[in-house]
Amino acid sequence: MAEDIDRDQVAYITIVEGPPPQFKPAEQLWVASLAEGPVPTFVASCDMRTFNGPGLVERCRRAWAEGRPARLNYPVRHAPYAPASTRAEIEIIAARWSQVKEGQVLTLWVRTEHAEQLITDEDQPNEL
């Protein structure tokens, strides 16, 4: 018997500790196809260290294969788009992991309709 899939159930990757991700414009040519749709979107990527890169990529792949979204849940300090909880979410549209000398790195490509969501705390001007 096939397992019932809740198509609204989101697959989350959550940054529990550490700073917010540093989003950078995605400049690879293939990224343009990920941004296409009825509403203009902005695509960026971010890198983060992880202990389980293959498992996190598989979580995204499984969700996409089942027609479910994958989202990055991350901390924010000062952002007009974030709720008062100081956390934000953004859609993950591609993922890969790589092994480096220091451990594993997870690279996520994300998409949003709101360019200001890609501005990190470090990009904000200091308030006086």
Image (cartoon, grey):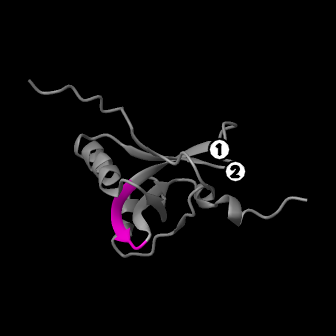
Looking at the image, is 68 positioned above or below residue 60? Answer: above
Q: Is residue 9 left or right of residue 76?
A: left
Pointer 2 residue:
79
Residue farthest to the right?
A: 128
Residue 37 visible here: no
Q: Quadrant of residue 19?
A: bottom right
- Give the quadrant of residue 66: top left
- Name the image quarter holding the C terminus: bottom right
Q: Amino acid at mark 2?
A: Ala
Cβ atoms under marks 1 and 2 closer than 8 Å: yes
Q: Say if residue 12 shows up in the picture.
A: yes
Residue farthest to the left? 1
Query: Where residue 38 sits in the image (x, y, percent)?
Result: 41, 52
Q: Is residue 95 above or below residue 86?
A: below
Q: Which residues are magenta?
A: 93-101
Q: Quadrant of the N terminus?
A: top left
What element does badge 2 sit on? loop
Residue at screen point 58% across, 59% down: 118
Q: Nearer the viewer, residue 39 or 107?
A: 107
Would you say residue 10 sits in the magenta stretch? no
Q: Please identify the dominant SS of the magenta region.
A: strand
Residue position for label 1: 82
Horizontally, residue 72 falls left or right of residue 97, namely: right
In front of the other: 16 or 10: 16
Q: Secondary structure at mark 1?
A: loop
Q: Is residue 85 above or below residue 112?
A: above
Residue at image coords 35%, 57%? 53
Label placed on residue 40: none
Q: Amino acid at mark 1?
A: Ala
Label 1 neighbourhood size at 10 Å, few (<14), some (14-19), many (20+)? some
Residue 100, image quadrant: bottom left
